[in-house]
Amino acid sequence: MSMNQLWFWIGFVGMVIGACIFGSRAIATRRREGMEFHLESFFICLTAATLYLTLATNLTVINFKGESIFLGRYIDWSITTPLLLIELGVLAGLRLKLLAGVVLADLYMILTGLVANLEAAPTSFLWWTISTGAFVAIFLSLLTEFTHSAARRSVRVNNLFKKMRNILLVLWTAYPIIWLLGTEGFAWIPTPIETVLYTIVDLCAKVGFGFILTSADPETLADAADPSHIKETAESYMASASQMRSNRSY
Ligand code: RET
């Protein structure tokens, strides 16, 4: 078994463990508000486990112009990264339209990242830059719109949001850096090491992130998930924005 394959199996087992933890938490909290966080974390790990299995068994490792492309990784990301952003959006009580915009930017980031992977240098660096542009837009929206919206929620929900936002920002930043260091970028690290790094960050961003989120105090999660709260947060945020506009002197 190659080092790549071994790490795909490790990724698979880690994600299955995550799915079991969050699945059982979702069942245990099924009659309580806030169970959606457990359920979403379960589906994130289930999706990743499934795609790691297809990578480990070579189904989604494709040969393109003589190079191995790990397509399964991109299929996984295009499903799980929107789900992770939706989790944060619900915590922040973000307006649905804004959340939809961020999810679209995220899909654009993953798809152009795949193109960067398929292309040869130097064009691949152009696509990396385009994909990183979308990443920067997401990064900034988390620090601005998400953060302003979360500031209108209860102190405990806001604190949980800030913790999860910071973890997400740090972990996600690792991806474009690994790409640059890896074989598709400057080739400073060999492909197997790149696979090890992606697998470790993936496990932290899905199992670790989900574990911290779903271990939060159940009252805070119930508060965060309350749909009337989310609506109120969005409305008060919009109202203050229009107030700011009418106060502005030209
Ligand atoms: C690529 C390469 C091109 C530039 C950028 C990338 C970003 C990828 C990211 C992936 C996040 C994945 C997560 C997975 C599961 O938990 C496509 C590597 C910006 C941010 C969080």
Image (cartoon, rainbow, N blue to C red):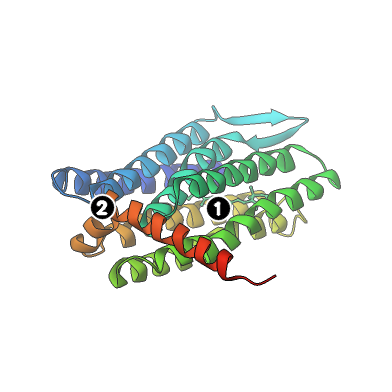
CA gap, disc 1 to disc 2? 34 Å
Tell me if 233 is positioned left or right of 59 in this view. left
> Is 52 placed above or below 227 here?
above
Q: 10 Å neighbourhood of mark 2: few (<14), some, or many (≥20)?
A: some
Name the residue tied to disc 2. Answer: 226
Tell me if 241 is positioned left or right of 108 in this view. left
> Is 114 placed above or below 220 here?
above
Residue 113 placed where, x, y %?
Answer: 67, 44
Residue 147 placed where, x, y %?
Answer: 47, 66
Name the residue tied to disc 1. Answer: 198
Residue at position x 76%, y 46% in the image: 127
Amino acid bearing label 2: Asp
Tell me if 166 is positioned left or right of 214 in this view. right
Residue 225 placed where, x, y %?
Answer: 28, 52
- Give the mark nearest the N terminus, 1 or 2: 1
Amino acid bearing label 1: Tyr
Element under label 2? Answer: loop
Q: Nearer the viewer, mark 1 or mark 2?
A: 2
In front here: 226 or 115? Answer: 226
Q: Is mark 2 within 8 Å of ligand 1?
A: no
Residue at position x 31%, y 72% in the image: 155
Residue at position x 70%, y 59% in the image: 181
Residue at position x 69%, y 54% in the image: 132
